[in-house]
Amino acid sequence: MSDLDRLQTVLAAEHRAVYGYGLTGARQSGTARRQSTALWQAHRTRRDRISALVSQRKGDPVAAEPSYRLPDGAPAQIAAGLEEELISAYLGLAGASDAALRKFAAQAMQEAMTRRVRWTRTSPPSPFPGLPENRLGPAQGS
């Protein structure tokens, strides 16, 4: 997979997060609504940055879908689910050949996990968030 393909995957995930935070913010009030609104804006900013990175690499940035199926649950659960999806998308970008993209991906994954923990008020489910369970142990046949 090329760095451009990895960026497109992350861009699609950020489009989904922007959509999702727009909906969760509308279903909340008070501090939670302000937090969702701030994160909606942060994801919009990051989405725009990634779109620019795609364009710089002569790619045509993937467009946002008209709507997305979101994780089930209360607004905080939806937001946590969006962050988990972002962790997985950025995990792919962490394998980029460009060192600057790898650093960007690592930082984005840390931020997404921090937001997920804040929304759920629970520890990460895995010591390596975003990595599929079957990849956590030694390779079979080694």
Image (cartoon, helix red, strand yellow):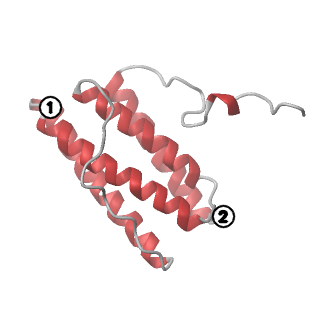
Viewport quadrant of the C terminus: top right
Residue pictured at 23% horizontal, 52% vertical? 41
Q: Nearer the viewer, residue 115 or 22?
A: 22
Up the image or down, 70 lies above or below 12; here it is: above
Above-or-below relation of 88 to 99: above
Whole-percent x, y for residue 88 in the image: 51, 42
Quadrant holding the N terminus: bottom right
Gap between marks 1 and 2 measured at Cα: 40 Å
Looking at this view, name the residue that lies furthest to the right: 142
Q: Secondary structure at mark 2?
A: loop
The residue wearing badge 2 is 97
Residue 5: x %, y % from top left: 54, 63
Q: x%, y% of residue 71?
A: 33, 32
Q: Which residue is mark 1?
A: 31
In what element is the residue under mark 1?
Answer: helix
State left or right for residue 2 relative to residue 122. Answer: right
